[in-house]
Image (cartoon, rainbow, N blue to C red):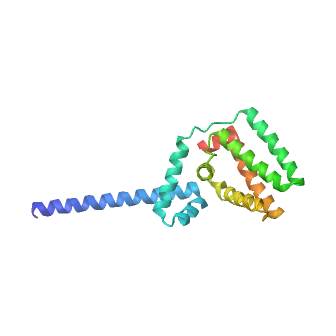
Amino acid sequence: MQNWQIVALAVAVVVLIVAAVWGFYNKNRSRQLRAHFGPEYDRTVVEFGDRRRAESELIQREERVRKLQIRDLSVTDRNRYGTEWMACQRLFVDDPGRALEHADNLLTDVIRTRGYATSNPYDRMADISTAYPEHAGHYREAGEILAHHRRGEASTEDLRKAFLSYRTLFDDILGGQHEELKRAS
């Protein structure tokens, strides 16, 4: 075998190894993103129309949330927000639409206090989908129901469904130390 043949064979082997490692890395990263984001992964792939672009978006979301200075709520804040939520629930009996508006505002306030984005709806949704991916779809749907309500197009059952979606996210994001320990593991 001549030298150039040995070099060509070595280059080919290196290229194959690099391709295999790169393929393994991409497959593993896709698996990790799918495991973390759950249904939000599939929704993002559909939205972007391309798995690579969607995964790039999800990776950017993770990096963005990692850079935020997320803070725990004080016991006083948790108690105050919990009390406000109870008042919101009582309001639902007499005025479901107003209660849903109040729940949305209260949840946004808690999100802001914790350190997540609130001024831009896209960033807020991206942060929620990253930090609380199990709630992202329901949170998005609740926001759509709220928009329908504002146009007079939502039933009481729709409002109830949205309110419950907000409640489950509210409970998790308000959760305090127990929630933070769960996220750390």
Residue in front for this viewpoint, 86 or 39: 86
- In the picture, measured across the screen, residue 157 lies left or right of residue 145, that is right
Image spot of residue 11 (x, y percent): 22, 59
Is residue 181 in view from this perspective? yes
Image spot of residue 100 (x, y percent): 79, 53
| Residue in the picture at 74% in, 52% down | 166
| Residue in the picture at 89% in, 54% down | 93
User: Considering only vertical position in the picture, is 112 above or below 28?
Assistant: above
Residue in front for this viewpoint, 130 or 20: 130
- In the picture, measured across the screen, residue 20 lies left or right of residue 42, that is left
Image spot of residue 1 (x, y percent): 11, 64
Query: How many numbered marks does the figure carry?
Result: 0
Residue most extreme to the left: 2
- In the picture, measured across the screen, residue 52 lies left or right of residue 46, that is left
| Residue in the picture at 71% in, 50% down | 169
- In the picture, measured across the screen, residue 19 lies left or right of residue 83, that is left
| Residue in the picture at 62% in, 40% down | 115
User: Considering only vertical position in the picture, is 153 above or below 37?
Assistant: below
Image spot of residue 69 (x, y percent): 58, 37
Q: Quadrant of the C terminus?
A: top right
Is residue 171 in view from this perspective? no
Residue in front for this viewpoint, 12 or 114: 114
Residue most extreme to the front: 151
